[in-house]
């Protein structure tokens, strides 16, 4: 059992921290208000290892790999919802839930992906409504026999392409209905696995086909109040090492030309290439972008998000650039080797911590020093700011938002594991 901090101590520590920050021109109260207004779209797929509810024996495919067999994985929509509610109760702030089309609930008969309607998602919508949270959506182009040869929207076979185009259209319609029902616009994201393991002879053909397929999917205008579309590029994947049809250049150009969002996934670039530095570039040309915040260890391994320099860099760019309203922050990772509820909580709390760190940085002063050309003082202040009493502000925020302070939330997860997850064998 982890001992909990006393509220009085938390307040005292916060008061000291507030004065320290205030001395650097940082208003901690304002930072906390701003943080409470930033939603993080938490991905459903950490809860069940990207299994979904369509069929039990379908291989994941698409180069996606989940490792680990920690007990207690959600097996039904009800279990996934209850696990997520547990996680939400341990994360400060008001967040969103990010669904994938393969989380459709079939009542009695199986509905194919090209025929999905809001019917298969109505329980999700009712649930989200009852929690007062928004939903986001993803088209699912993997874990399906028609995706088995590693091509979907770029497939040489017209019939297969048509199937996936129809899937895309259905998903945008579903997204719009979700957005309408919840009164919060739904982001519907497209990621496809299309690529080749070995050197292609024709790089052009699949890209031409993908362009046509996307245009067909997006041909119907949908009110952005309800549904907003996004496309997600990738550099390489397992099984698509030599060629990915939907590369960064392909989708960046597409997004600019066709006025859809671009999803930057932190695991989708060269191992040393971060996405933080891309934000201010692409936002010169795009009104809005989406993020899949992830942590790749040596490859796009989708480890739980930790408070790394890279994560802090992403948060700094969003906050320091004044882009809070233009970046839809989402998470994308899946670790089956640890408690899945804890994985949600750790990653999301870290995203929130990174945002708070960025909000608490003496950015005005740093920008002034930079404008004066005093790079020595800029570096000195940046480094000293790293050890300001951030923890006291974070703890106070958790207390104020009625979630456990410090590592105290693990008591709740352990209890839930004993009482609920352990009984799922
Ligand atoms: C895959 C993409 C994609 C998926 C999810 C499950 O490389 O990152 O976003 O992780 O759709
Ligand atoms: Zn992603």
Image (cartoon, rainbow, N blue to C red):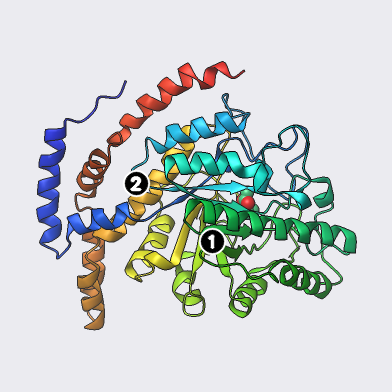
Q: Nearer the viewer, mark 1 or mark 2?
A: 1
Q: Earlier in the sequence, mark 1 or mark 2?
A: 2
Residue 194, above or below 131: below
At x 45% / y 34%, what residue is drawn? 85
In what element is the residue under mark 1?
loop
Q: Position of residue 303 (x, y in %)?
A: 53, 45
Residue at x 33%, y 49% (from the top left corner): 353
Q: Is residue 215 left or right of residue 391?
A: right
- The residue at the point 36 percent across, 50 percent down is 352
The picture quadrant where one finds residue 188 is bottom right
Examine the image and state in which quarter residue 367 appears: bottom left
User: In the picture, which quadrant includes the C terminus?
Assistant: top right
Q: Is residue 245 left or right of residue 363?
A: right
Residue sitting at 84 percent across and 53 percent down? 149
The secondary structure type at the circle numbered 2 is loop
Distance in Å between CA atoms under marks 1 and 2: 23 Å
Comparing 33 with 353, the one in front is 33
* Relative horizontal placement of residue 283, taking residue 254 as reference (left or right): left
Tell me the tag on residue 226.
1
Residue 65, image x and y in percent? 67, 43
Q: In the depicted view, which residue is nearer to us: 1 or 103?
A: 103
- Residue 112's disc is none
Residue linked to disc 2: 93
């Amino acid at each position: 059992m982890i001992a909990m901090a006393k509220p009085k101590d938390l307040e005292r520590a916060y008061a000291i921290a507030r004065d320290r920050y205030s001395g650097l021109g940082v208003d901690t109260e304002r930072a906390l208000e701003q943080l409470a207004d930033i939603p993080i779209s938490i991905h459903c797929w950490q809860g069940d290892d990207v299994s979904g509810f369509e069929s039990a024996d379908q291989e994941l495919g698409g180069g996606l790999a989940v490792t680990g067999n920690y007990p207690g994985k959600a097996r039904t929509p009800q279990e996934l919802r209850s696990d997520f509610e547990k996680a939400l109760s341990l994360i400060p702030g008001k967040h969103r839930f990010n669904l994938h089309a393969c989380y459709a609930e079939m009542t009695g008969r199986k509905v194919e992906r090209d025929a999905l309607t809001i019917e298969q998602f109505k329980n999700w919508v009712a649930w989200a409504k009852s929690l007062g949270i928004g939903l986001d959506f993803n088209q699912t182009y993997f874990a399906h026999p028609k995706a088995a040869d590693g091509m979907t929207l770029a497939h040489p076979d017209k019939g297969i392409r048509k199937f996936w185009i129809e899937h895309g259209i259905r998903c945008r319609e579903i997204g719009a209905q979700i957005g309408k029902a919840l009164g919060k616009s739904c982001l519907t994201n497209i990621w496809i696995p299309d690529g080749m393991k070995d050197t292609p002879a024709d790089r052009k053909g699949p890209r031409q086909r993908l362009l046509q397929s996307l245009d067909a999917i997006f041909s119907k205008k949908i009110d952005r109040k309800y549904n907003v579309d996004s496309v997600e590029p990738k550099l390489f994947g397992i099984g698509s090492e030599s060629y990915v049809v939907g590369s960064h250049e392909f989708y960046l150009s597409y997004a600019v030309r066709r006025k859809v969002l671009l999803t930057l996934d932190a695991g989708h670039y060269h191992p040393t290439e971060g996405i933080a530095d891309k934000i201010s570039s692409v936002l010169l040309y795009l009104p809005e972008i989406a993020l899949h915040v992830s942590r790749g260890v040596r490859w796009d391994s989708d480890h739980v998000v930790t408070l790394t320099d890279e994560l802090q860099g992403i948060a700094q760019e969003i906050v320091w650039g004044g882009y809070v309203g233009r970046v839809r922050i989402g998470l994308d990772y899946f670790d089956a080797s640890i408690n899945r509820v804890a994985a949600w909580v750790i990653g999301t709390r870290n995203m929130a911590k990174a945002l708070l760190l960025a909000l608490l940085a003496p950015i005005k002063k740093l920008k002034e020093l930079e404008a004066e050309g005093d790079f020595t003082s800029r570096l000195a202040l940046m480094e000293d700011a790293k050890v300001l009493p951030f923890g006291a502000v974070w703890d106070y925020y958790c207390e104020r938002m009625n979630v456990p302070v410090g590592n105290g939330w693990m008591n709740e997860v352990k209890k839930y594991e004993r009482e609920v997850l352990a009984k799922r064998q």
